[in-house]
């Protein structure tokens, strides 16, 4: 059952992390009569754009000096164009960027087009979003427990819709492969809406959605019996352990299914890839970042503005749609999640690219 609680706990989390404790440091910062840009490296109307435009109003209210805050859409190359432009921004607090899972996948798979370094940016806040794995009822797993359902899936051929060979849906492929579901035919070129429809019609059998998409667009079909919820990707806690998804705390996770299936914890290069995907798709689903080299007092001013936003009564009325029931992540914990998404040695990188090429049936280069 989904956790439909309001977002009030985020206020407590922000306070516990000491975001407001930096207010004294930020007192020297004043953006009065300035214009602050939030770069969205995608077109208008998507999730990142909605995230930025929701925060825009409150940042204008709570940043020191109440500056004019504008959202600038710079689409192109799966966020590469906008991220490349942001990498050159002055660290004066007047430019920020919203990054998403696609920004992370582009940084890994974008080749020589990538001129940005996510690990050099200063994260103001990370906004996680859980991922749910589900299957079509034509697989015959309806009514079965997740471990038994996984055995059924592993014993038959499956199909899986994905937008591109390096799309963010790779997280689901890693999850199903980790569980021993290896005979999967990818159907390329399907966006989220098309993927859902092909599953409802039984034309594809495996799927994944972020919490927001699952709760609004998939769960009704789970209730009607046309789709079956299998589990979640999990959630990385403050100690770095993978636990239950806060948005779906009663739903089993992929690592739990694996341990029940194999009697031991997962390990190896596929598990490492799973952890990379978990961090980039769940823990860093959306984030607000400042340029490399931004002074501590400016970072503190931005964090203070986010802290105030999370406590604003008007924001709390719309926060469920933007942030869901997830704790916001700051400081060193945010940087650790970013490293967890991107850190891999050359051997792991070569394995990952080889695994994608094998599973997708197309060369991607490295």
Image: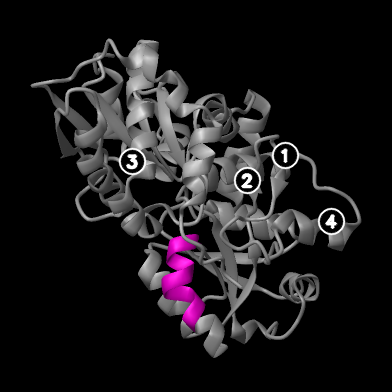
User: Whole-percent x and y of residue 219?
Assistant: 50, 76
Chain-order first, disc 3 or disc 4: 4
Distance, label 1 to label 3, CA atoms, is 40 Å
Label of residue 269 in the image: 1
Colour mapping used in the image: one colour
141 left or right of 103? right
Of marks 2 and 3, the one in the foreground: 3
User: Whole-percent x and y of residue 60?
Assistant: 19, 34
Marks 2 and 1 in Cβ contact (< 8 Å): yes
Q: Which residue is mark 3?
A: 309
Chain-order first, disc 2 or disc 1: 1
Of marks 3 and 4, the one in the foreground: 3
Of marks 4 and 1, the one in the foreground: 4
Residue at 24% in and 18% down: 89
Q: Name, please, the residue furthest toward the bottom.
A: 224
Q: In the rendered image, is residue 310 in sight? A: yes
Q: Which residue is mark 4?
A: 259
Label of residue 355 in the image: 2
Look at the image and give the residue range highlighted in magenta: 210-220
Residue at 27% in and 39% down: 41
Q: Secondary structure at mark 1?
A: helix
Residue at 79% in and 70% down: 147
Q: Nearer the viewer, residue 146 or 2?
A: 2
134 left or right of 296? right
Q: Nearer the viewer, residue 35 or 208?
A: 35
Chain-order first, disc 2 or disc 3: 3
Chain-order first, disc 2 or disc 4: 4
> What secondary structure do most residues of the magenta stretch adopt?
helix
89 left or right of 131? left
């Amino acid at each position: 059952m989904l956790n439909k609680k309001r977002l009030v706990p985020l206020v407590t989390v922000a306070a516990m992390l000491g975001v407001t404790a930096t207010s004294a440091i930020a007192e020297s910062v004043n953006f009065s009569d300035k214009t602050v840009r939030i770069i969205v490296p995608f077109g208008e109307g998507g999730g990142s754009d909605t995230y930025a435009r929701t925060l825009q109003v409150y940042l204008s209210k709570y940043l020191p000096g109440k500056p004019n805050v504008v959202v600038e859409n710079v689409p192109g190359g799966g966020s590469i164009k906008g991220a490349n432009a942001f990498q050159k921004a002055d660290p004066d607090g007047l430019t920020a960027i919203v990054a998403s899972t696609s920004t992370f996948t582009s940084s890994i798979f974008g080749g020589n087009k990538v001129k940005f370094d996510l690990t050099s940016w200063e994260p103001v806040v990370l906004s996680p979003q859980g991922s749910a794995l589900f299957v079509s009822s034509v697989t015959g797993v309806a009514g079965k427990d997740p471990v038994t359902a996984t055995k059924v899936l592993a014993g038959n051929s499956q199909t899986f819709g994905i937008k591109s060979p390096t799309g963010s849906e790779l997280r689901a492929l890693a999850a199903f492969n980790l569980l021993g579901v290896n005979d999967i035919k990818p159907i390329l070129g399907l966006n989220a809406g098309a993927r859902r429809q092909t599953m409802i019609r039984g034309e594809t059998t495996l799927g994944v959605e972020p919490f927001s998409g699952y709760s609004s667009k998939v769960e009704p079909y789970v209730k009607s019996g046309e789709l079956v919820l299998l589990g979640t990707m999990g959630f990385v806690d403050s100690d770095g352990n993978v636990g239950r998804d806060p948005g779906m705390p009663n739903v089993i996770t992929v690592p739990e299914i694996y341990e029940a299936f194999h009697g031991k914890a997962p390990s190896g290069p596929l598990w490492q890839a799973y952890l990379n995907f978990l961090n980039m798709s769940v823990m860093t689903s959306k984030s607000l970042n400042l340029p490399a080299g931004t002074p501590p007092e400016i970072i503190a001013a931005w964090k203070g503005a986010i802290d105030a936003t999370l406590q604003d009564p008007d924001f709390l009325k719309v926060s469920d749609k933007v942030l869901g029931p997830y704790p916001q992540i700051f400081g060193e914990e945010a940087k650790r999640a970013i490293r967890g998404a991107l850190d891999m040695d050359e051997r792991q990188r070569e394995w990952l690219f080889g695994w994608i090429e094998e599973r997708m049936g197309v060369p991607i280069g490295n």
